[in-house]
Image: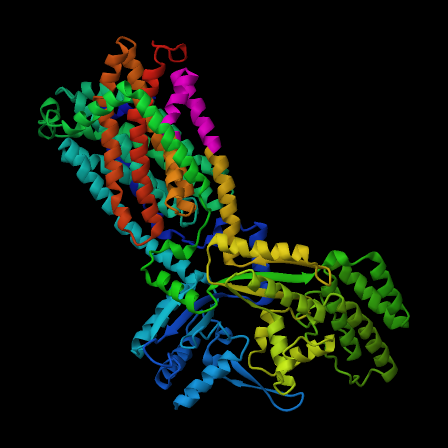
Amino acid sequence: MYNNTVAASIRNPRQVFWLVGMITLLLCIPFPFVEVDVDPEAMLSENEPVRVYHNEVKQQMGLSDIIFMGVTLDQHDDGVFNVSSLGRIHELTSHILQVEGVISHNILSLSNVDTIQPAGPGAISFSRLMPSPPTTREEALAIRERSADNPFLLNNQISKDGKALAIYIPITAKDQSWRISNEIEAKIKQLNGPENYHIAGLPVAQDTFGVQMFIQMAISAPAAMALIGILIFLFFRQIHLTFSALGIAMASVIITMGLFIASGSTLHIMSSMIPIFIMPVAVLDAVHVISKFYDEYNGNREETLNKVMRGLWKPMLYTSVTSSIGFMSLLLAPIPPVQVFGFFTGIGILVAWILTMTLLPAIIMRLPEHALASFGQKAKAKDTQISSALKTLSQASTKGRYAVLGTALIFIAISIFGINSLVVNDNPTKWFEKEHPIRAADTLINDRFAGSYMVYLNIGHNDSDVSPGDTNELIQKITAYGPQGKLTNDKLADLTAQENDPVKRLNATRTWVTQQMQGQNESSSPNSDDDLSFDVVDDTPASDVTEDTFAIWSNIDGILATAMQRFQITKDPAMIRWTDQLAEHIQQSGFQTKINGPSDLIKKINKELHEGNTTKYTVPDSREGIMETYLSFQSSHDMHRLWHIITRDYSSMTLSFQLNSGDNVDVDALTSSVDTWIENNPPPQAIKTGWSGLSYINITWQQKMVSGMASALGGSALVILLMMTFLFRSFWWAVISMVPLSMSIVMIYGMTGLIGKDYDMPIAIISALALGLSIDFAIHFIVQYREKLEQHSFAEAIDYVFHAPAQAISRNAIVIAIGFSPLLLAPLVPYQTVGWLMMSIMSVSALATFLIMPAIISLFRPKSIIAER
């Protein structure tokens, strides 16, 4: 392998340039065809049950992703409820209705919702809350008062202090939210009013992150590369070799990302960081070679290069393979984007190794003579600061080994305490800095309104509650009606073979019966849109249907309607009151959430049907009473809103929990509390429940991330231990090589817990990088030490390692740690996280290599478990 890579490249540099250049250019071709998906929902596979159920509920209930917009004017006594502000808000709403991608009939705004008022005994009237802008202060304040009396708007659209309002903008697709929000902001600038507009919501945060992610990649990655280049130049004072190291890193990134895109993979939040993870490893390899060449150069580049590359061949092969394994272990994580990220980053590391073994020697061989004129001992004489620091560390690690190991144990204990304090949590809105407009808007909306994070609890009839006896009883009742009954039973039997859901079967059969009553021959499938939503049947027979036949069909329909009642839980007063009790429990438990369901609407309509009598703000005692509220609401302009909370066959309802925090810990606490309450307070009917919503999906993939990363980390650590055992032909040397790795992971996670930072996706993934980079330093240290120990004493071997090899390790650590500091200035928090974690990994692993490993070697040197060779 050495002859086919390094030796061949030294002999044929031109051919290497051509080959690498052609491959790199070829893999630039796929770049314009990259597909982007920053939706956290894609963290789960399309077949993941929670994701499938989420999409089913969205379709069943007509739910949409929502952009939240808060409007404030705190300097005005009436807030935004003044004539001028409401006029501009009305104009803005009219504009939003025309924006492509907005579901206009579902917008929740002052001009697009009804006020509900009594219209005499048993009658109710609906009228638009703000059909036109008010002209007087009295009219503006009246709008505010009527808004607060609408269950759809209270604390949703009207702020808690009555001075601000929110507009809820449903959209057709999440990936349109950035464009839509920009179009809205452009209109706001045209209005040029004193109001403050705040746009937030998970879709906006996710889509905006996707856009800014590319901008950040275009800024932070080159900035990091530039700073790394400056540091390399300061170390070696050789511009050609500096650009060589950066060129290898860039070529590694281009080749890897070209393969990534050509494979059809989608660029996700994690995969966008592939270049940032490949670059340090590629630079590490190149700096090791340049550093060794820097120390060994004697004027004969081919001789020096062969000597350097032969000495680094095995350790660099192992460091690259272990780093690759660290990332490819992410294939064990049950999260598709993380699997893709791990696989291609692992590929990229191997690509970087191949280029370091081929392209770098070729470049060095083609350098002009004057480029290396000052390279060597004369230049190295200036390199005293690092040497002095390493000498101090050498003495501290050997002479003060007990103090070093005792201090390390203290830090481990503190880190374990920090690890126990870790909180697994993520929130896409927190991917932005606190000062970012989206983060600031999110804070304001969730402070002044019910919240911008939606979680849905779907409550439906329980199919398993149907027994064969129930079916037989229904058949017997229908059979009593002669030929019509037999036809109906035949229809039921046909539908049973097509559909398991009894409600769909009964509903489709009722539709078919209605067609027979009207003399129609069309058949109905169990998924027919004609679903008797209001249980209203035309009682006028067709001309070719006799009154007796019509009566028979009508009686059969009545039997089917009665059979359906057991499943129509949204008509059951006891079930509606049970949801009220659930909501009351949640409120009393201290959760900051507003629960929207059929109960508030039923009670509001019932009150107005009784001429506004407040004592009638209750759930009616009968199914007929509840059905009357549903039917009454059909006169509203907002009748479609009813089907967001109940299904048209009345067999399911959805309670929407509007939270002011999208943190996983808060969402998990709420859903767990609800589930526990339901378990301890059985409903009056047999039901089945399920959770959906973007915030709930986040919980699922976070849990998978934790368990998956634990498996990946443990599995890859075991593989690396076995590889080190094979490399060193010693289990104990392998164990010692794992010390920097273990210290890095323990201290990074411990520090994360101690400072109170959430354990999120970037922090979970960084452990894979810690595996690869930390073992890198240990391998180089131990290989050089053991080779020197073959012919020298312990003291001489340690002294040697703390010179040239340790200088190469320290240069690498400094280059990466400082080189990635520009990421700390990025406005996107995941990039900041990667920045400070990179710096931490380099610092901890280098110190562990220079202090703890030599202390262990020094302490156990006389013992048989680490025999000198």
Percent x, y of residue 508? 73, 68
For the point 26% across and 9% down, the residue is: 792
Nearer the observer, 743 or 455: 743
Q: Quadrant of the N terminus?
A: top left
Q: Quadrant of the C terminus?
A: top left
Residue 325, image quadrant: top left
**Vertical arrangement, residue 822 with respect to residue 850, above or below:** below
**Vertical arrangement, residue 171 with respect to residue 795, above or below:** below
Whether residue 721 appears in magenta in the rendering, the answer is yes
User: Does residue 790 appear to the left or right of 324 in the view shown?
Assistant: left
Residue numbers of the magenta segment: 714-742
Whether residue 695 appears in magenta in the rendering, the answer is no
Q: Tell me the chief SS of the magenta region.
A: helix
Q: Is residue 158 visible?
A: yes
User: Does residue 497 appear to the left or right of 726 in the view shown?
Assistant: right
Q: Is residue 775 visible?
A: no
Percent x, y of residue 23? 31, 38
Nearer the observer, 496 or 716: 716
Nearer the observer, 402 or 310: 402
Residue 789, image quadrant: top left
**Vertical arrangement, residue 26 with respect to residue 39, above or below:** above
